[in-house]
Amino acid sequence: MKDTLGVLLAGDAGERLLPLTQNRAKPAVPFGGHYRIIDITLSNCINSGLRRLFILTKSKALSLHRHIREGWTGIMAQELGEFYEALPPMQRMGNNWYMGSADAVYQNIYSIGSEQPKYVLILSGDHIYKMDYRRMLEHHKRTNAELTIATLPVSPDEVSRFGVFDVDRSGEIEGFQEKPANTSFRSPFDVDSVEASMGIYIFNTEILLKALIENAEDPKSDHDFGRNILPNLLGKKKMMSYRFVDENKKQALYWSDVCTLESYYEANMDLCSVAPVFNRAGLSEPVFANIHRPSLCLARQVV
């Protein structure tokens, strides 16, 4: 993934996780003992060979910045151009903090441009899942896509929680709805499900930068990928769906947004079970954690 730059959105305040998010951002909330929620996505990046990553933080980010500095930056070979770097709002574009997911990336457009990547991978730092982003990038290249979106099948009863797509048999996206009350869309691979967005995007860099600039100049925009960027590109650029391939290696797909206290509790209790659904210690795709020691802080595998 040497031609790819990762941009991880880690500014979610997580109001529905209060009081756990009273003093820290949602991605910095402890998870499964040694971990923070963000460690799951960062581990996916390490296991996928993604070694250049901007982590966009926002409010209550002190503990998150410390966690990244002490547990993750030390394992990067900086002399080879590798980095996992936290970027708070620097207000180069005005006096506003990040006003939406698209605006957060737009405000760091100079940092992205300075790295001159061929592809930009947009990620979210508050989901629990295992994924090899290399597979998605290979699919993006093979299909000559200009934008590829990771999708997973969901029940039609759950579509109000997701952006959902109308996808043809080749995987090309022909329609999009952001969190509809209901939808007539159905997956061409399973008529009882709908293809839903995981909030993971691969853009050709030129396409992304132009879309961000146009969106920033629109005074009516919400500056959001789901509400603005994707609908504006639909029908104009080649948009492909990449169906989620779960590296968790269990029978059912595992993807969780621990956005409520109930879902957070259930995900943690799963890890305590005799046979947890989420496999932390897979040999080929381990989850790494920040282990504090008196004189050494490393990101290491917890088995």
Image: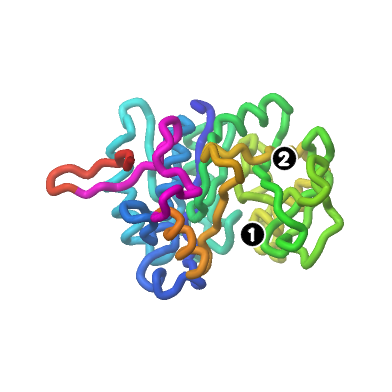
Question: To which residue does mark 2 refer?
Answer: 241
Q: Say which element carries label 1.
A: loop
Q: Residue furthest left?
A: 294
Residue at far front of view: 274
247 lies left or right of 25: right
Image-based side of 160 in relation to 134, left or right: right
Camera-side residue of 15 and 256? 256
The residue tagged 1 is 223
In the image: residue 88, left or right of residue 73: right
Span highlighted in magenta in the image: 272-292
Residue 257 figure quarter: bottom right
Q: Which mark is residue 3?
A: none
Q: Quadrant of the C terminus?
A: top left
How does the figure colour the protein chain or chains?
Answer: rainbow
Residue at x-position 57% and y-position 50%: 255
Q: Nearer the viewer, mark 2 or mark 1?
A: 2
Q: Residues within 10 Å of mark 1 (few under 14, many from 20)?
A: many
Coordinates of residue 50 in the picture (x, y in percent): 46, 33
Q: Of the residues shown, which amino acid type is indicated by label 1?
A: His
On the image, the x and y values in percent for residue 123 come to 54, 47
Q: Residue at x 48, y 34 (%)?
A: 115
